[in-house]
Image (spheres, helix red, strand yellow):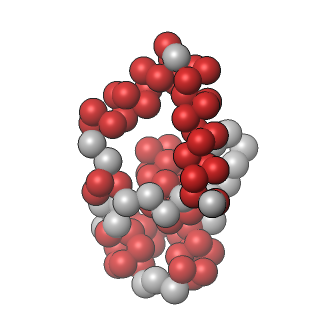
Amino acid sequence: MKSVDKIDAREIRRKLGLNQQQFWSKLGVTQSGGSRYESGRNMPRPVQHLLRLVHVEQIDIQKIKKEDYEVIEYLRAKKSDLFKELKKEAKAQKKG
């Protein structure tokens, strides 16, 4: 996500049909904290990234393990061709 990207958390929440408690608790943010972000308070980048992963990309962060993340980072840094190939295959698998 680029620094110019602006996440409209309220709009995402409304499109998903969730109340503030349901929406923000999936990110580990209190309802009152989420309400402040929706009202214009600056949202920290880690919260922005979590919001995108959980509510836009629909990733269940409860299922992600540290080892999985470490493998992904290793592939991305050291085996980029393999990473791209696996990513392409996974995308094709999902479509087909």
Residue 21 x %, y %: 35, 78
| The C terminus: image quadrant | bottom right
| Outermost residue to the front | 96
Q: Residue at x 55, y 28 (%)?
A: 83
Quarter residue 81 falls in: top right
Residue 10 x %, y %: 57, 74
Q: Nearer the viewer, residue 94 or 69?
A: 94
Q: Residue at x 56, y 62 (%)?
A: 56
Residue 72 x %, y %: 43, 31
Please say whether residue 39 is visible from this viewpoint. Answer: no
| Outermost residue to the right | 4
Please say whether residue 76 is visible from this viewpoint. Answer: yes
Location of residue 3 with respect to 8 vertically, above or below: above
Location of residue 79 with respect to 50 vertically, above or below: above
| The N terminus: image quadrant | top right
Q: Residue at x 57, y 57 (%)?
A: 94
Residue 74 x %, y %: 42, 21
Q: Residue at x 58, y 20 (%)?
A: 80
Q: Nearer the viewer, residue 96 or 42?
A: 96
| Outermost residue to the top | 78
Q: Nearer the viewer, residue 74 or 20?
A: 74
Looking at the rendered structure, the number of numbered marks drawn on it comes to: 0
Quarter residue 3 falls in: top right
